[in-house]
Image: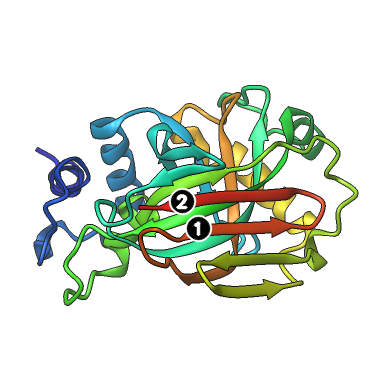
Amino acid sequence: MSKARQAADLLAKVRRTGVVLDSFPDDLVPVDRDEIYALQDALIAALGAVGGWKIAAASESAPLCSPLLASSYLPSGASLDITTNRATIVEVEVGFRFKADLPPRGTPYGRDEVLEAIEGALPALEIVGTRFAADFAVPRTVALGDLQVNAAVVTGTVVSDWQGLDLANLAVSADVGADHYAVDAGTTKEAIIDALVWLANNGAVRQGGLKAGQVVITGARINKPIGRPGEMVEASLDGLGQVRLMLT
């Protein structure tokens, strides 16, 4: 059995059963980007279909990315058991839903082709969770291989007329229980489109390319502790609307 498959089996068991790990074998820790991606792909193979992608736009010329499980996507207004998911962080992000497939091909997709394949932008929450006990220092490459510690993505309504928005100066706010947060700066539209083009031509190829219905989240604008069961998380992104999640 391959190194990636062995590592994925450990992480997949936690996702299925909720029984957490308090260590991780040194010989299964990914040592480079290729091994990180091999672990991600092995987890997807073990757990289900791809529903979208996570990418940190503008982080680097070839940004780290991860496929996300279709089962992890929830509609706005849904509830999530954060104890079972060992959720620790909520992030407010700009997401993009695709309306057309962009399968792997010999000629790279151009910017206009990728834009044409996008149905629209949407407000999104990413919930970050862990498969490990709180006192274990998880190796960074393991966290990245573990689908970049994604536990859930909550999506709002798609806005088709999004290209006129100034994403670099987008007003974003979030209420997590009684706590309020707000920002008005973030990644530019140009950098986000560049990241989506890179994803179409590079990162997503290993999972058959981007596909209609998939949602790509593009990086945290607000990153805060998750809150407590019984509380509501509600975010508002100027021009994109609201997205909500009930914590249980």
**SS assignment at label 2:** strand
- Which color scheme is applied? rainbow
| Residue 34: % across, % down | 35, 51
Residue 114 is situated, as x and y percent measured from the top left of the image, at 73, 34
Disc number at residue 60?
Answer: none
As drawn, the label of residue 232 is 1
Which residue is located at x 68 percent, y 73 percent?
Answer: 182
Q: Is residue 115 left or right of residue 32?
A: right
Between discs 2 and 1, the one toward the N terminus: 1
Distance (Cα) linking label 2 and label 1: 5 Å
Residue depicted at 26% across the width and 57% down the height: 83
**Residue at 53% across, 30% down:** 209
Crowding near the residue tagged with mark 2, few <14, some 14–19, many ≥20 C-alpha atoms within 10 Å: many
> Which of the pair 17/2 is nearer the observer?
17
In the image, residue 200 above or below residue 30: above
Image point 12% across, 60% down: which residue?
21
Q: Quadrant of residue 214?
A: top right
Q: Position of residue 88 (x, y in %)?
A: 36, 66
The answer to whether any part of residue 56 appears in the image is no
Q: Is residue 114 left or right of residue 204?
A: right
Q: Position of residue 216 (x, y in %)?
A: 58, 43
- Specify the amino acid type for callout 2: Met
**Mark 2 highlights which residue?**
246
Q: Are marks 2 and 1 in contact (CB under 8 Å)?
A: yes
